[in-house]
Image (cartoon, helix red, strand yellow):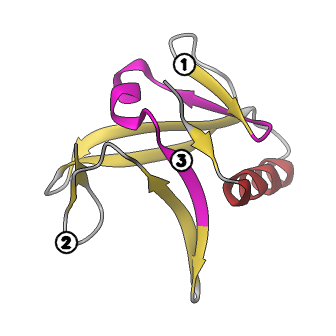
Amino acid sequence: MSVTLSQSAARHVNRYLSRRGKGVGVRLGVKTTGCSGLAYQLEYVDEAIPEDVMFETQGIKLFIDPKSLAYLDGTELDFVREGLNEGFKFNNPNERDRCGCGESFRV
């Protein structure tokens, strides 16, 4: 089982954590919501939770709750710029379908 960051995502997370002046990494997860059933969650972590599974990639610690890991296994988190927009993109091989608005997905 693994979850990784692209170089672009790692640079963005590093810059953000440096500007914040605190933080140990990023927590990824999924929640039940939307038309297709699941939505991604991302938050910066100041303190690890003992139950979290931790991966380290590109020098960044990724924390994932055990329930979300089954949905996120093999995912690469990328940071992309498309025109004037920029943001994180989950490249998840488990994703089978995405709703029309792009806010939720199904495995």
Q: Earlier in the sequence, mark 2 or mark 3?
A: 3
Number of numbered discs visible in the structure rendering: 3
Residue at point 22% right, 51% down?
96
Mark 2 burial class by Cα count in 10 Å: few <14, some 14-19, many 20+: few
Q: Nearer the viewer, residue 19 or 67?
A: 67
> Is residue 74 rendered to the left or right of residue 48?
left
Q: Which residues are magenta?
A: 58-79
Q: Residue at x 56, y 43 (%)?
A: 43
Whole-angstrom CA distance, mark 2 to mark 1, is: 31 Å
Pointer 1 local density, CA inside 10 Å: few below 14, some 14–19, many at least 20? some
Q: Please, which residue is most extreme toward the bottom here?
A: 83
- Please tell me which residue lies in front, 28 or 23: 28
Q: Quadrant of the C terminus?
A: top left
Amino acid type, callout 1 = Val
In the displayed orientation, state which residue is furthest to the left: 35
Q: Mark 3 sits on what residue?
A: 76
Q: Which residue is mark 1?
A: 53
The picture quadrant where one finds residue 67 is top left
Amino acid at circle 2: Gly
Q: Quadrant of residue 91?
A: bottom left
Residue annotated with mark 2: 100
Query: Does residue 56 show up magenta in the picture?
Result: no
* Place of residue 68 in the rendered image (x, y in percent of width and height, measured from the top left): 37, 29
- CA separation in Å, label 2 and label 3: 22 Å
Q: Is residue 85 left or right of residue 9?
A: left
Query: Do the CB atoms of the residues marked 2 and 3 lie less than 8 Å apart?
Result: no
Measured as percent of width and height from the top left, residue 24 is found at 75, 32
Few, some or many residues within 10 Å of mark 3 (<14, 14–19, 20+)? some
